[in-house]
Amino acid sequence: MKTYESQVCIVGAGPSGLAAAIGLALADVPFVLLDAGTGPVTESRALVMHAGGTEVLRHLGVADELVDAGLKMPTFRIYGRRRTLTTIPWDSVASPFPFILFVPQRTTESVLHRRLAQLGAQPLHEHRVTGVAEVAGGYEVTGDGFAVRAPYLVGADGLGSTVRRELGITLPTGTYDTAFLLGDVDLDGPLDPTVTHVFPSRHGLLFFGPTADGPWRLIITVRTPRLPTTPTKQVLQRHVDERGPGGLRIKELTWSAAFRAQHGVASSFGHGGAALVGDAAHTHSPTGGQGLNTGIQDAYDLAATLAAIHRGAPAGAALAGYRSRRHAAAQEVVQVTHRVHQALTAGTLPVHLLRLGVLSVLELLPAVRRRVARTVSGIGRTPQATGAPTLRPADNR
């Protein structure tokens, strides 16, 4: 059996795990990064980077490359079928990044991998963790043919987190009665590629987001007690015809998926020298595009916290501060996404007519629209805004 000794063991090399590893590498904190996969994902998956997430990535040294690779969206346009009801002005957010950045998760992960390599580190891929045990001086993390011993443990291994389970931490969840159909599609028709288009209806939500590499991201909600099958081009086209502005034809479907959204926050973000980040700690509706951003913010905060401990800060108080800050941030994200989800997907004709009226009034209240943009942008939930330690790169970084 191959045995590793380090200061920190990170389990999971998705965006959150990679961001935590980059933060530790910048501060010269020794770590081992384990991942069950073979490398960056190849699907587009998460697509939206808000200002709050991009600000964190600037501190990790990757924001410029991601912005160059993505597509900047200054405006969301929300419709009542063919009529614009209101716009959400992301360019009003007080940030160096006053826009939503559309960039596929495969690109984000590739950029993070390259940054980590620049700092002299690599994940250990195809290392699936099956056990976590508390031992003298910290934790022993084991899998088929390997073991890692470290005083500190980071669970960045997603919603089905082995680390969370082995630590005995629960993540109570509720499940929405709506399922999400996703598709990356090539379109023919009169849809402005410089704007994000949102069509709420009594049938559910229809969302079109342009991407830098060509396809549109299509998101559709459907009310169903069961998880739908992976949608075909024909199924997506039917929903586009039913809810869209008319005249749109899907020429090609390059990727699709279906899932049911849950919402909940872990009972704890860790204990002892162990802490959770990202989907291992919270889950919520994708409406609002908060998942990837919140996980990266968690990861930066925890990396800065562990770096402060490495410099001599009291471990117990520092980690308690991390758990308190990020638990509060996650609860706010779940509340915000739940409100957005309900506002844009609630059914029945009377509710839909009320929604159309509220959205029309919203257009007359620019201060409220700016507040909505700021809340969803996440700039008030960044580690810098919530009192996290400052990540201090080592002199050689």
Image (cartoon, grey):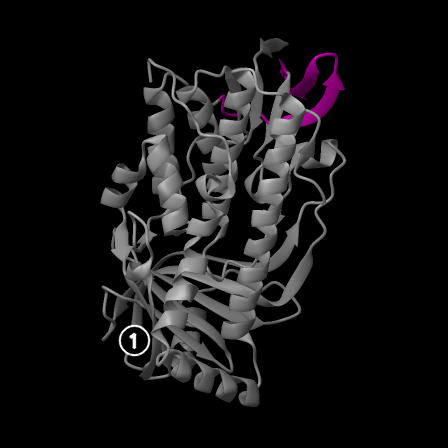
Closer to the camera in the image, 62 or 175: 62
Q: Quadrant of residue 314?
A: top right
In the picture, the quarter occupied by the C terminus is top left
**Which of these two is toward me, 248 or 142?**
142
Q: Give the percent coordinates (x, y) of residue 124.
A: 50, 21
Crowding at dot 1, Cα within 10 Å, few <14 / some 14-19 / many 20+, comes out as some
Q: Can residue 60 be found in the magenta stretch?
A: no
- The residue under the point 44% across, 32% down is 19
- Residue carrying label 1: 248
- In the displayed structure image, the side of residue 65 where residue 253 appears, left or right: right
Residue 365 x %, y %: 37, 77
Find residue 226 and report its horizontal and vertical position in percent.
65, 66
Q: Is residue 83 above or below residue 372?
A: below
Q: How many marks?
A: 1
The secondary structure making up most of the magenta span is strand
Q: Mark yes or no: residue 339 visible.
A: yes
> Is 42 located above or below residue 179 in the figure?
above
Quarter of the image where the N terminus is located: top right
**Vertical position of residue 347 compared to residue 290: above or below:** below
Position above or below: 137 against 143: above
Q: Is residue 43 visible?
A: no
Disc 1 marks which amino acid?
Answer: Leu
In terms of depth relative to the viewer, which is nearer, 252 or 160? 160
- Residue drawn at the location 26% of the way across and 53% of the way down: 71
Query: Element at badge 1?
Result: loop
What range of the chain is rendered magenta?
124-150
- Residue displayed at 49% across by 82% down: 355
Question: Residue 33 placed where, x, y %?
Answer: 51, 23
**125 drawn magenta:** yes
